Image: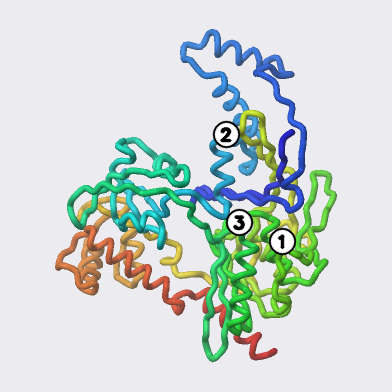
Amino acid sequence: MRRSRFLLFMTLAAVAAIVFLVLDGCSGQEVETKTEGPSSSFQVIDEAYKLIKEKGVYPVEGDALVEGALRGMADVIGDPYSTYFTEEEAKAHKESLAGERVGIGAEITRSNGKFIIVAPVKSSPAEKAGLQPYDEIVQIDGKRLDGSSLQDVVKRIRGKEGTAVKMTIYRPDLNKHLELSITREVIPVKTVTGKIIEQRGEKIGYIAITMFGEDSAAEWKKVTDELIQKGAKALLVDVRGNPGGYLHSVGNIAGSLLSQDTVFAHMQEANGTLTPLVTDSSKKFAFDEKLKNIPIALLQDKGSASASEVLSGALKDLKRGYITGTTSFGKGTVQETMDLSNGGEMKLSTHKWLTPKERWIHGKGVEPDLEVKQNDLFKEHVRPVMEKYKEGDFHDDIAYAQRLLIGLGYGVERKDGYFDESTVMGVTDFRADAKLDEGDVMDRKFFTALKEKVEKFRKDEKNDEQLQMAIGYLHHKISNK
C-alpha cells in the first residue's frame, strides 16, 4: 500500500523555488500501487530497455533507465507542475516545508565559483562555532569543493543530528584559513513572524508568512494571540514572495479570519465537478474570535503563488480583506503526488482550484484592490561579493552594484555590467559617503558597505511604499469603525 497526497504546487524558475500544498484530509489516503520489474505492458519499452542494456556501448544502470523513462513520461505531458521525483528529490521537497531541519544554521551563496557564508542564524551551531559573514568554505570533511554545485555543498553540510561536520574556511579579514568543527542540530524553521506597527496613535499587527508550512497554523495562532493582547486594532498580512505551501495550513489560517462554514475555495475535477472547501472551527487551533471582525489588509506581489493566492482570492472575493501590491503569480492547478515503489514520487496535475466566486486565476493571478509598485531595491537579492573590479571591466557583479547604486540615488547611467565613467563617479561618491578609503574601484569593502546600506534602506518601513499604502488603508478603516 502506498500513500497518495493532493498537492497544489508552484515552480518559479527564476528563484528555483519549489513548494507544494497537501489537501487537508487526504494526507492519509491509501492507494494500492502495483510494482513489477522492468517488464511493462508496453512491449516497445521492454524492447528499448533490453537493447540499451545488451548492445549499448555506454553502460547504464537499470535503475537509471527506469528513472529516465519515468521522468520522460512526466515531461511529455507538457505541464510544468507534473513531474517525477527521485527518492532523494522527493525527500528534499518534503523537508522544504518541515517545521524543523537538521543542519548548522547558516545561509550560503555561490559567487564566482566560491561558496560564501552570507550569515549564520542567530544562536545556531554555526554562530556558536564562530562562522562569520564572508567566510569562504574551502573544504568539507577534508574534501575540496571544486566542481560542486550549491546543492551539493548544502547536502554535504547536512546530516544526522549530533554528528559533526569539519569545515576549512578562508577568512578575508584575517587573510588566513581556519578549521572549524560544527555539530549538527535541529534548526527550527519559522514561517510566521509578527510585530506591532504603531503609527498615528494606532496599533496595527504586522504578520509576515514566508510559506504555508506544516506548523504555520500553530505559528499563526501564537503570533495573532500576542498581537491581539498587545492591542492590535487591525492586521496587515504580508505574503510577498510566498511561493505556497500546504493547503490545510492556509485553510486553517483563512478559517481564523472567516465565519464558520464559509467557502474559501473550490476544487474542480477534470470532469468539471466542483467540491467546495469550507472553513471549520478547529479544536486544535482555538483562534481568538476577534480575528473574524478585525480589519485586514494583505500585501502580495508577483512572487505570491498557490496557497498565497488561495488566501488573497478568498479575502478579495468575500470582501474580508483589502489586497495591496501587485498582481500575484497565477497558479491555479492542484497536483496529486503518489509514492512509487522505488522510493520516488510521481506528481500529476489532477485538479484546478477556484476562488469562492468560482474564478480560475491560473495564468492571470489575483489582482490587487490597490496596485502599488515597489522600489527596485526591494527586489534585489543582496549578496556578498569578494572580487575586485575597476573601470573598463565587465561582469555581472558590476551590473548588480550598478542597480543598487541607481536605487540609492547615485547617478550611474548603465546597469549592464560595464564599468564606465558614470559608474566610476557613482562608486567614488558612494565610497566618500560611506567613509571608505578614497578610490574608484569596487572591492570587498565597497560591496560590504553597499550591502549594508541597502539592507538599512529596506529595514526602514518608510521606504516600503506598499506597506505604507496598506497601513494608510487600515488607519482609514480603524477611524471609521
Say which residue label 3 marks: 213
In this rendering, position of residue 159 left or right of residue 296: left
The mark tally for this picture is 3
Mark 3 is on which residue type? Gly
- For numbered disc 3, what is the local secondary structure? loop
Disc 1 residue crowd, few under 14, some 14–19, many 20+, Cα 10 Å: many
Say which residue label 1 marks: 251
Q: How is the image coloured?
A: rainbow
Query: Where the C terminus falls, by quadrant?
Result: bottom right
Give the quadrant of residue 447: bottom left
Residue drawn at (64%, 66%) of the image:
367
Mark 1 is on which residue type? Gly
In this rendering, position of residue 120 left or right of residue 334: left
Say which residue label 2 marks: 86
In this rendering, position of residue 102 left or right of residue 470: left
Above or below for 294 versus 97: below
Above or below for 121 versus 92: below
Comes first in the chain, label 3 or label 1? 3
Per the model, the C-alpha gap separating discs 3 and 1 is: 12 Å
Query: Where the N terminus falls, by quadrant?
Result: top right
- For numbered disc 2, what is the local secondary structure? loop
Mark 2 is on which residue type? Thr
Per the model, the C-alpha gap separating discs 2 and 1 is: 29 Å
Q: Is residue 462 visible?
A: yes
Residue drawn at (67%, 50%) of the image:
8
